Amino acid sequence: MTTPASTAAPAAAPAPVPKARFDWIPLALLGGLMAIGLPAIGSPSTWLALTVAGLAMGLIVFIIASGLTLVFGLMDVLNFGHGVFIALGAYIATTVLAAMSGFTASPLLGMNLVAVFAAMVAAMTLAGAVGWAFERVIVRPVYGLHLKQILITMGGMIVGEEIIKVIWGPLQIALPPPEALRGSVFIGDAAIEKLRLLAVVVGLAVFAAMGWVLARTKVGLLVRAGVQDREMVEALGYRVRRLFVGVFVTGSALAGLGGVLWGLYQQSVTPQIGAQVNVLIFIVIIIGGLGSTLGCFVGALLVGVLANYTGFLAPKVALFSTIGLMVAILLWRPRGLYPVTNR
């Protein structure tokens, strides 16, 4: 007998889409490294100072590398010329801080911060503008050609370094921190350098801003979707090419910001400062997972903390610690800590 439509059983509700579970293991790895470092170092005050210094170094490296990992994730571009934007940001900082010597020589922290943030804004603006020209002239003709990208972007970095030498000279330039940012503050018996604390604050602010933009805005949604499946985003009618340019300019600006902090961290600037950091940047990106912002963040912190611990415990090993960390993580997770789906 046919069941009347009025008495038919209601259709079953569709099963809810399961949410992806967050992977806490890489963060636990960072916490475990810190926990192991305490008994190995022995002194809690020394451990705290080394940990803060490592976090500061890691956050500076994250600022520099975050733009590059987005460029690779969205644009599939291996930009070995990223170092020129780092060097440009550091040299712009020397010029701006020298011009604002009245602010940098003041014992007032507020005036010092005005000078530092003015240098950061100038570095980001000019590095972003140079990045726009770099993308149009050098990178755009070699989209999809990885070998040519490596060769032409390395050539672009060499040319950029020579232009920097013409403008600022080939010799090393001192970049001392402003007056109120020199020295240390004490947390118990641990001496924490003020400049390290500034780097931690700026790095966390950049990470929070990137997280908000990528997770809460339409532009961020398109960037994340473009990293996962560029063809689908283009099929929906969005102009991925404009995203390309915007992401490249943003990545260049972040490299300029990181160059300011790295120059202050080193307290000196040379034309090769960007090339010296390039290897470290690519190690961080590989550890984190190609195209992953969160992976870049965790990878940078791991590299920074491990480099400071090994530099204190075994200075000869410190040169190889980051490479050893990369090899160990790739043996454990061949695609990095937080791999992107299509990488």
Image (spheres, rainbow, N blue to C red):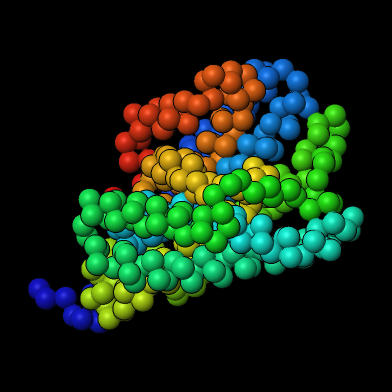
User: Which quadrant would the N terminus be assigned to in this image?
Assistant: bottom left
Residue 34, horizontal then vertical, whole percent: 62, 29
Residue 250, horizontal then vertical, whole percent: 48, 66
The residue under the point 41% across, 44% down is: 282
- Among the 4 quarters of the image, the one containing residue 312: top right
- Among the 4 quarters of the image, the one containing residue 77: bottom left
Q: Residue furthest left?
A: 1
Residue 251, horizontal then vertical, whole percent: 47, 62
The residue under the point 24% across, 62% down is: 142
Q: Residue furthest right?
A: 107
The residue under the point 56% across, 30% down is: 306
Q: Nearer the viewer, residue 13 or 60?
A: 60
Residue 307 visible to an observer of this rendering: yes
Q: Is residue 4 left or right of residue 45?
A: left
Q: Is residue 312 left or right of residue 254?
A: right
In this picture, is 54 found above or below 9? above
